[in-house]
Amino acid sequence: MRKNPEKLRGFTLIEVMISLIVFMVSLLGLVALQRASIAGTSKGREHTAAVNLGRFVLNWVQSEAATFPISQTTPNSTDFPLIENAISSGNLDSWQLLPNSATMRFDAYMGNNAQSHYTGGVDAAQFCVYYKMSQFVKGQDSSGDDQFVNEVYKLSVMVNWPKWKQYHTNWTNCAARPPVGGSGEGANLIYWESIELTSVVTREYTSKMQQ
């Protein structure tokens, strides 16, 4: 019995080419999805590291405040370096670098770079930390002057890091970044990722312990 030649016909060249094109388009889509997934994971990891750094500094300042004796009126730079720097003359309500050094950056594990820990051009310490303290205003007196709440401060901590550090000319200089940066690339927010955390700092704990 002879078989029908029509049933033995294979794929034409055009059909094979169309199939290959469909496969390639699908493959390119999967590659793009994979790249987006990797980029999202990396960005999420950087954000988590920045939040951890911010919380660490919030707790650091809170710890200084908790051990600041109520009998003292002025913190010293040895025992209370962050508070002393933040509330010293002219520094209230203004961002300060942590720890007041343009070149002191941190990596994802809270290790500082110190410029000497990395060799061969590898430097992963991209995070800069800034903080400021502001007094709470409870109102104004009859002459219109602000009346501040004693020993109660708003603490703000900002952590930023470069979006594309390989394209920056000054990404290693924290003093050239926002919020304390000057002009040009350093102060332009489109080049930087940033998070800001806030808290309240009081001396209530110490005052209770000394009663």
Image (tube, rainbow, N blue to C red):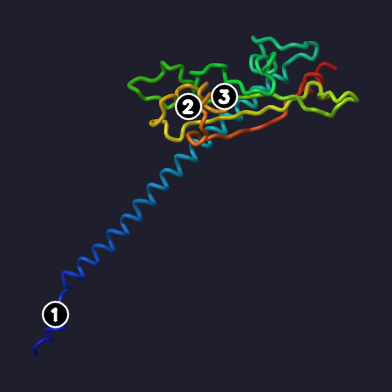
**Mark 1: which amino acid?**
Leu
Mark 3 / mark 2, whichever is N-terminal? 2
**Mark 3: which amino acid?**
Val
Mark 2 / mark 1, whichever is N-terminal? 1
Viewer-proximal residue among 177 and 183 = 183
**Mark 2: which amino acid?**
Asp
Residue under circle 3? 180
Give the number of the mark in front: 1 or 3.
3
Q: Is residue 26 above or below residue 154?
A: below
Image quarter hosting the N terminus: bottom left
Residue under circle 1? 8
The structure residue drawn at horizontal position 55% and vertical position 34%, both measured from the top left corner, is 194
Marks 3 and 2 in Cβ contact (< 8 Å): no
View extreme (right): residue: 142
Q: Position of residue 44 (x, y in %)?
A: 50, 41
The structure residue drawn at horizontal position 54% and vertical position 24%, both measured from the top left corner, is 181
Q: Position of residue 159 (x, y in %)?
A: 56, 30
The structure residue drawn at horizontal position 83% and vertical position 29%, both measured from the top left corner, is 138
Spatial CA distance of label 3 from label 2 is 20 Å
View extreme (left): residue: 2
Residue under circle 2? 107
How many callouts does the rendering have?
3
